[in-house]
Structures are given as structure tokens and as C-alpha cells.
Image (cartoon, helix red, strand yellow):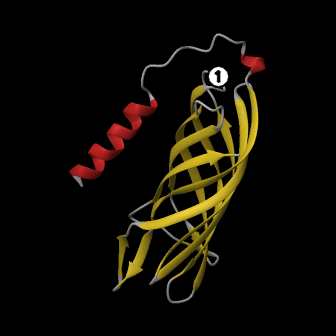
Amino acid sequence: MNSAIKIISVFILTLFGSHAVAEESITSAKDKYGYIDFGVLLPPLQLFDRYIPIPVPQIGGGFRYQSGMNGVDTNLQIASICVATVIQGSVNWIFYPHPNVNHEFYLGIGPKISVEIVRHGELVFSPNFILGKQYHSPKGRPRHYQIEVMWPFIINHITYNSLFPAVSFSYAMGF
């Protein structure tokens, strides 16, 4: 547990790391791009009658649009290991406190719908909370890395309360 807290703390510190304040006006920070992302999903999978967060590799794609301090992100991801597969889709509102398309921190929120296939398919609805950093590579390509926290609470029309949220760490490359 302590190592997980240390990893999350280091991730948050890099997000809030020092960076130049945007010299351009807020209204001129505009960007839109498609992307592919790679990462790790830690879903609370039910195995052996317990909910256990197991690291599952994930890959996905999406589209992001930014205008000033606001943005929209849509994506579809799949995470799979031999005993479990999770397919997720979401639409998120993104807030950029200090807009600068070259290097910026952001927060996001939105609904996430997942289909979890372990023994049988489960349809899951959960709120999605995002914390991330967006920047451009030296060649001008957009990139971002983020952490998403999803707390599933409706599964197959049944209200559900998990002790563990699903957590996702991902890195995306725009095109």
C-alpha cells in the first residue's frame, strides 16, 4: 500500500512540476487531435470470491479538442489478460487551469461505461475523474499522460459499492 501511495505521489508531483505560465492569451490556446494510448488498468476484479486490483495492460484511442480553458475528450480502450477483458468508453469534460497548448496540466470528469468480461459480461457505469499533463514533443506532436479514477457503482442495473476504485495510468501519442 505504501509503494502505491509513493507512486501516485510522484505522479502528482510531476504533474504539478514547475513550468512556464502561458504567455499567450487564454482564448488562443486551441488544439485538437486524435491519439492512441497505452497504459495499465487496475480494475477491482472479482477472483476467488474477492475483489482484487490486478494490473491489466490496456490500449486505446480517442479524440481531444481544446478551446481555452475547456476541452472534450472521447476515447475507447481495451484492457485484457487471459482471465479478464475490460472494454471502456468515455466522454470527458477537461478543464485546463493555465491554458498553454505546449505544456499544461488538466483535470477532467465524465461518465465511463465499461463491459467487464471475467466469467460473464458485466455492464458497468461509473464516474470518471482525470488528472493529467498535456504537452508537445520536440517535433510538435501532442502527447499526454494521465491517471483516471473510476468508482463503479451501477452494474447490470444493480447499485454496487466497491471497496476499490478502478485506476488507470496511461500515456498517449497524438497524430
Q: Quadrant of residue 158?
A: bottom right
The answer to whether residue 87 shows anywhere in this view is yes
Where is residue 169? Give x, y as percent.
47, 52
Residue at coordinates 48% horizontally, 80% vertically from top-left? Answer: 84
Where is residue 104? Give x, y as percent.
58, 27
Give 70 or 157, whichever is nearer the viewer. 70
Classify mark 1: helix, strand or loop.
Answer: loop
**What residue is disc 1 on?**
100
* Crowd around label 1: few <14 · some 14–19 · many ≥20 (10 Å): many
Give 144 or 46, whichever is nearer the viewer. 144
Residue at coordinates 60% horizontally, 24% vertically from top-left? Answer: 97
Q: Amino acid at mark 1?
A: Asn
Q: Is residue 61 above or below residue 108?
A: below
Where is residue 117? Give x, y as percent.
55, 82
Residue at coordinates 66% horizontally, 38% vertically from top-left? Answer: 94
Quadrant including the N terminus = bottom left
